[in-house]
Amino acid sequence: MAAPLLLAVTIASGLSTRGHSAIVAVGAGFAAGLLGAVLAEVHLARRARREGEALTNAIAGLRAGDFSLRLVQPREERLGGLVAIYNDLAESLAGERGELRRRELLLDGALEASPAAVVLTGEQGRVLYSNRAARVLFRDGKRLEGHGLDALGEEMPGALAAALGGAEDSLVTVPHADGEETFQVHHRSFALDTRPRRLILVRRLTVELRRQEVLGWKKAIRVIGHEVRTHLAAMLSLARSARQFSERGEGLRAVELLEDVDEAGVALQRFIEGYGRFARLPDPILETVELRGFLMHLARGEAFRIAGELPQIAVVVDPGQMQQVLVNLLKNARESGSGAEAIEIAAWADERTFVVEVRDRGCGMEAAELERALLPFHSTKPGGSGLGLAICREIVEAHGGSLKLASRPGGGLSASCRLPLESLPHL
């Protein structure tokens, strides 16, 4: 207001010196001062409006994802604090976006280089993202985005298409030009921005399985060779001693040693037959069995408790083979260090499958051990043959089912036998 006041005094003084009355001079000066004040306020209002519009446009840019714009500190004190806050916010958001972009590039590079096929789907099962391995596996390198899983299934073997469309993790073996190809399919469901998403991971296991198979056979040969050599060495030593006692006329002592030779031979025979049973596992002889009664009968000879309610259903299995599976799983549970009161069996069913699960609170297994535990000749027990779980898996798979091991929250292990449920009436 200093400039308009100075202008009013100057005009009033000039009019007075030229002979005008004091009232006219003062009135003219007041009018001029008022006009100057109004013009000054208009100028300030325009500048404040421009600075406010600039701030409004900058905030709109933030909403649109443009974090590059910075504002000059305005003369208007009321907007100065807001502009400072805006500049700090834009700087922070720009830094976070740059960091997210760098992480996104690293993740995208890792996924593109991954040998596993990765597919992310949204609603209606349409593909939102796929890496190079998925494009090569499912569409010979063509884009998958926008396609539905059902459309992809038309271009691949039925078993693999069914595994992709399902919700359970599974192992799938499909025919291939050079024989067979085995895939491991993982499913993970989650919500992103409240919208359902599903991540599917498909790994080729053929090479790994062949490597594990070779390693298994090498271990089998070493184990068999070691056992045979050990038994033969003991038998030869006993036979040599028996011959010496016989030559000295100590026939009774020689007979005792020959009996020891016979016992060593029987032990070696049992060992060889154990491996033979794995190689000559008979086909299951299926019978209709009431599941609750079957488990109650098992409880007469094995120590465990029933968890929850048992389904009143009839199942079609080989009772002897399934009892062998459950007895072996219960034995493993006891040997894991679990208390007898913590060993339990649970069972449930849906329209197509039923599950019998053995649970314990023992020492459990590391993730790497879980992956190898079902392979033949792999054992974590000193002196173990590594055939128990492998035979269990063979029996369950011969029934058209699957055997899965998993760590339990709070410690311990669960072994789940999932088997197909025949279309039989509920009892």
Image (cartoon, rainbow, N blue to C red):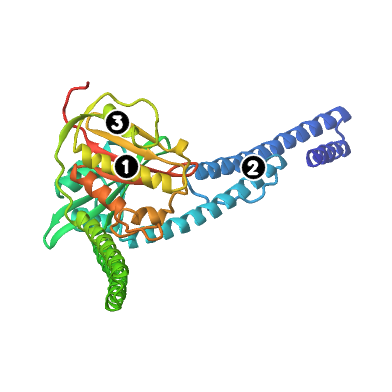
User: Picture coordinates of residue 421 (x, y %)?
Assistant: 20, 32
User: Picture coordinates of residue 3 (x, y %)?
Assistant: 79, 42
Seen at 88% across and 30% down, the residue is 22
- The circle on residue 297 is 3
Q: Please give the residue where the numbered disc 2 appears in the rendered image.
A: 47
Whether residue 82 appears in this view of the structure is: yes
Relative to 20, does residue 171 appear above or below in the rendering?
A: below
Image side of residue 1 versus residue 365, left or right: right
Cα separation between marks 2 and 3? 92 Å
Closer to the camera in the image, 79 or 15: 79
Which amino acid does the dot numbered 3 rest on? His
Q: Residues within 10 Å of mark 2 (few under 14, many from 20)?
A: some
- The circle on residue 327 is 1
Q: How many marks?
A: 3
Relative to 41, does residue 130 appear above or below in the rendering?
A: below
Which amino acid does the dot numbered 2 rest on? Arg
- The circle on residue 163 is none
Which mark is nearer the camera, 2 or 3?
3
Mark 2: which secondary structure? helix
Residue at far top of view: 427
Cα separation between marks 2 and 1? 87 Å
User: Picture coordinates of residue 270 (x, y %)?
Assistant: 25, 58
